[in-house]
């Protein structure tokens, strides 16, 4: 309404007002304002996904210290609830209005924020918990998050005019009528479930094989540090070969790594190698997701489609840890069943997204998409 009133006051015709949506659809693909939005979105990724990617530190600390009388599956409910409520990045929607051809690159840059957070938080928390205790460690990290999110709130803004409408539950079902969106959403549910297992249990499993606790605490930082290469690289690959092709490749690779490298990993070198390689794939997966949605969704529906995509995935994050923990408890503390489950679910998720690509391209497996 505000935009229409401004046009009327400036003497523009109604025809000019009608062409305004086309000017919004032409995105600048750069400029100071656009890159400042990327900076702000990077901060939100640092604080949200960066924190979620540090859950392995908390799982190990809780199991060995303040919650040692509880089973791994019960402890993991705390971390999965945290991921369930944090799994949202509203700032990502704003990037779509500023970037088109360089969209995957912009998303890749933003996604490096979670890698940076996933490196900073585990090391920071491990050191602070030992030096000043758990309560003050939480206060110190909260202060860091406050500073970063203040910058985010000052720089992120939407280029697409808001178009509020009365709430209707039916509107939230419309995207699922599109077969491609339903397939990528279900594929993401499966992959998110499978990939969250090593993120949560890698440290605990490493300690159980005899790895020194001080070295094991750095595994989460290794995963997230290596994920930065995947996040940046997949953005470039997504712009060249298409976001779907990039997503499918890295998620299949992640599933293969879980089955072929994590299962037989019983020494420090093999576990660190898995952490490094899986981190690259996981980072690439996380970075390219928004571009996947933008590829098959109308620009005016990007917000609701992104929200639905992450909302349904959050339920898999909610139950993945407890189910994996229960699998561990019922297999005499053997991690084999948990690892098999994680790898198979990763491969299944990649297959559903491959199906979405084939459907959207008219069953052309080599098409850029």
Image (cartoon, helix red, strand yellow):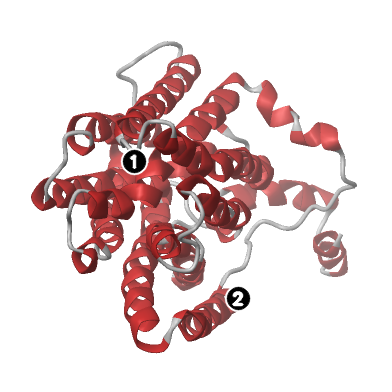
Label 2, residues with CA under 10 Å away: few <14, some 14-19, many ≥20: some
| Quadrant for the N terminus in the image | bottom right
Task: Please name the residue shown 84% across and 36% down the image.
Answer: 169
Task: Please name the residue shown 23% across and 56% down the image.
Answer: 226
Q: Nearer the viewer, residue 34 or 220?
A: 220
Mark-to-mark CA distance, 1 and 2 = 28 Å
Question: Badge 2 is on which residue?
Answer: 153
Q: Residue furthest right?
A: 166
Q: Give residue 61's mark.
A: none
Q: Tally the marks.
A: 2
In the drawing, does residue 267 fall left or right of residue 202? left
Please state which of the two labelled residues, at mark 1 or mark 2, is closer to the viewer. Answer: 2
In the image, residue 131 lies at what x, y percent?
35, 87
Q: Is residue 225 depicted above or below 146 in this figure?
A: above
Question: Badge 1 is on which residue?
Answer: 238
Q: Nearer the viewer, residue 82 or 176?
A: 82
Q: Is residue 140 depicted above or below 338 in this figure?
A: below
Secondary structure beneath dot 2 equals helix
Q: Determine if residue 294 is in view.
A: no
In the image, residue 361 lies at what x, y percent?
44, 18
In the drawing, does residue 159 fall left or right of residue 280? right
């Amino acid at each position: 309404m505000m935009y229409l009133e401004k046009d009327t006051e400036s003497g523009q015709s109604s025809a000019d007002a009608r062409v305004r949506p086309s000017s919004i659809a032409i995105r600048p693909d750069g400029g100071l304002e656009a890159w400042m939005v990327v900076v702000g979105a990077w901060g939100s990724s640092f604080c949200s996904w960066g924190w979620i990617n540090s859950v392995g530190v908390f799982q190990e600390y809780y199991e060995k210290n303040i919650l040692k009388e509880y089973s791994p599956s019960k402890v993991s409910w705390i971390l999965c609830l945290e991921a369930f409520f944090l799994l949202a990045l509203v700032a990502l929607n704003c990037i779509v209005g500023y970037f088109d051809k360089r969209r995957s690159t912009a998303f890749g840059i933003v996604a490096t924020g979670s890698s940076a957070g996933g490196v900073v938080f585990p090391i920071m928390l491990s050191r602070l918990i030992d030096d000043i205790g758990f309560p003050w460690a939480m206060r110190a990290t909260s202060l860091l998050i406050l500073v970063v999110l203040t910058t985010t709130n000052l720089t992120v803004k939407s280029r697409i005019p808001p178009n509020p409408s009365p709430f209707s539950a039916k509107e939230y079902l419309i995207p699922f009528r599109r077969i491609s969106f339903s397939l990528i959403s279900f594929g993401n549910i499966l992959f998110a479930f499978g990939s969250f297992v090593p993120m949560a249990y890698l440290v605990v499993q490493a300690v159980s094989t005899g790895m020194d606790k001080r070295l094991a605490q750095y595994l989460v930082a290794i995963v997230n540090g290596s994920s930065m290469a995947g996040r940046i690289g997949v953005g470039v690959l997504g712009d060249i070969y298409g976001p779907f092709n990039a997503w499918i490749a890295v998620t299949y690779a992640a599933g293969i790594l879980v089955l072929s490298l994590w299962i037989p990993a019983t020494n420090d070198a093999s576990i660190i190698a898995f952490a490094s390689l899986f981190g690259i794939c996981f980072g690439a997966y996380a970075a390219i997701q928004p571009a996947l949605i933008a590829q098959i969704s109308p620009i005016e529906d990007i917000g609701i489609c992104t929200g639905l995509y992450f909302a349904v995935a959050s339920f898999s994050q909610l139950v993945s840890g407890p189910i994996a923990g229960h699998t561990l408890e019922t297999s005499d503390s053997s991690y084999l069943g948990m690892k098999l489950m994680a790898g198979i679910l990763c491969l299944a998720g990649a297959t559903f997204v491959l199906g979405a690509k084939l459907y959207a391209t008219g069953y052309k497996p080599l098409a850029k998409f």
